[in-house]
């Protein structure tokens, strides 16, 4: 769970690797050497791991793919596809939550799950600080010698490499590409929503780090609104009631999330469907499983199309 924290110390970033061709290779999931033991590794059933490198940065990333039940038996069927950031944490969690939700009959639609890895060979926090944040961070919470602010490059990588790769290898419904992100991942999702909204039709934005960059997303929301009259997306936001100044001395993430939801609703975008929940008795580290469960029900539940704004 500590991987979802927005701040922390980090070592100096590694020197960028030499660019390489964008050749996807199926490969075992990367695990840090310190996590390897003498026994056999635990493997999730019905999952696949692929290398999908970024030819521009030269970094190597992986995608983790879980296919729904009956995928092979229904060759004509296409499925919604959910892309989850912080894949090392979120992939197994989302897979099992979806399985449990449909344990006694269909509660949500079957979907293809894609977990997005950190850069292979890097520790999680330096990778996500760099890839998930929109601007350099020089404030009091910035980790020494940490690299921030390269989300535009990472969004380009997702758009040009990952999305086409998944669409070419699996029967995805490209009109129903969905996004899931927590903390910095929620920040990145908002960045995509307000810069490249065509990439995804639905978003689960959990405990977004809207404090980041002196509230950089507030300015981006205003910039987007100045040139757009609609925002076709279904958005589910969640935040824990304990993510506020009373319990956290630096940020009030509840108010920040409420303010973003209020600003988006005030624009009157006819095709935007926005749900916000402040979940009781949850903090930044505990809220993920519950928020994801609610988000899957909103975006993929049998009544998703009939839900009204809250």
Image (cartoon, rainbow, N blue to C red):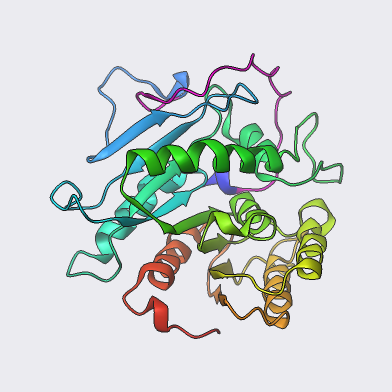
Q: Where's residue 154, x and y in %?
A: 63, 39
Magenta: main secondary structure: loop
In this rendering, would 268 be left or right of 241?
right
What quarter of the picture does the C terminus occupy?
A: bottom right
Q: Residue at x 53, y 75 (%)?
A: 280
Residue 17 appears in the picture as rendered: yes
Residue 138 placement: quadrant: top right
Residue 207 placement: quadrant: bottom right
Q: Where's residue 149, x and y in %?
A: 76, 41
In this rendering, would 196 be left or right of 141?
left
Q: Residue at x 82, y 41 (%)?
A: 136
Picture layout, residue 31 above or below residue 224: above
Toward the left, the furthest residue is: 73
In this rendering, would 181 be left or right of 243?
left
In this rendering, would 17 be left or right of 235?
right
Residue 2 is covered by the magenta coloring: no
In the image, 240 versus 119, the foreground residue is 119
Q: Residue at x 28, y 65 (%)?
A: 101
Q: Residue at x 28, y 39 (%)?
A: 47
Q: Which residues are magenta?
A: 5-31
Residue 19 is covered by the magenta coloring: yes
């Amino acid at each position: 769970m500590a991987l979802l924290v927005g701040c922390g110390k980090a070592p100096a970033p590694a020197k960028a690797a030499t660019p390489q061709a964008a050749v996807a290779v199926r490969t075992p999931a990367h695990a840090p050497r310190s996590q390897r033991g003498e026994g056999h590794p635990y493997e999730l059933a019905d999952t696949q791991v692929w290398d999908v490198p970024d030819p521009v940065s030269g970094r190597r990333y992986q995608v983790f793919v879980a296919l729904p039940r009956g995928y092979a038996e229904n060759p004509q069927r296409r499925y919604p596809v959910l892309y989850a950031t912080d894949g090392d944490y979120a992939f197994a969690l989302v897979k099992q939550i979806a399985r449990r939700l449909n344990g006694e009959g269909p509660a949500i639609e079957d979907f293809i799950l894609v977990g997005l890895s950190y850069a292979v060979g890097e520790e999680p926090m330096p990778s996500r600080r760099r890839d998930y944040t929109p601007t350099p961070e020089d404030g009091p919470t910035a980790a020494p010698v940490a690299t921030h602010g390269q989300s535009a490059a990472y969004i380009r990588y997702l758009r040009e490499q990952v999305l086409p790769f998944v669409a070419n290898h699996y029967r995805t419904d490209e009109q129903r590409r969905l996004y899931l992100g927590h903390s910095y991942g929620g920040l990145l999702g908002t960045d995509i929503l307000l810069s490249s909204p065509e990439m995804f039709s639905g978003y689960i934005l959990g405990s977004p780090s809207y404090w980041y960059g002196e509230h950089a997303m507030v300015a981006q929301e205003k910039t987007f609104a100045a040139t757009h009259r609609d925002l076709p997306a279904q958005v589910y936001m969640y935040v824990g009631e304990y993510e506020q100044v009373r319990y956290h001395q630096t940020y009030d993430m509840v108010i920040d999330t409420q303010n973003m939801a209020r600003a988006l609703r005030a624009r009157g975008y006819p095709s935007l469907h926005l749900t916000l929940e402040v979940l009781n008795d949850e903090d930044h580290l505990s809220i993920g499983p519950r928020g994801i469960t609610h988000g899957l029900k909103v975006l993929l539940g049998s009544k998703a199309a009939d839900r009204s704004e809250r």
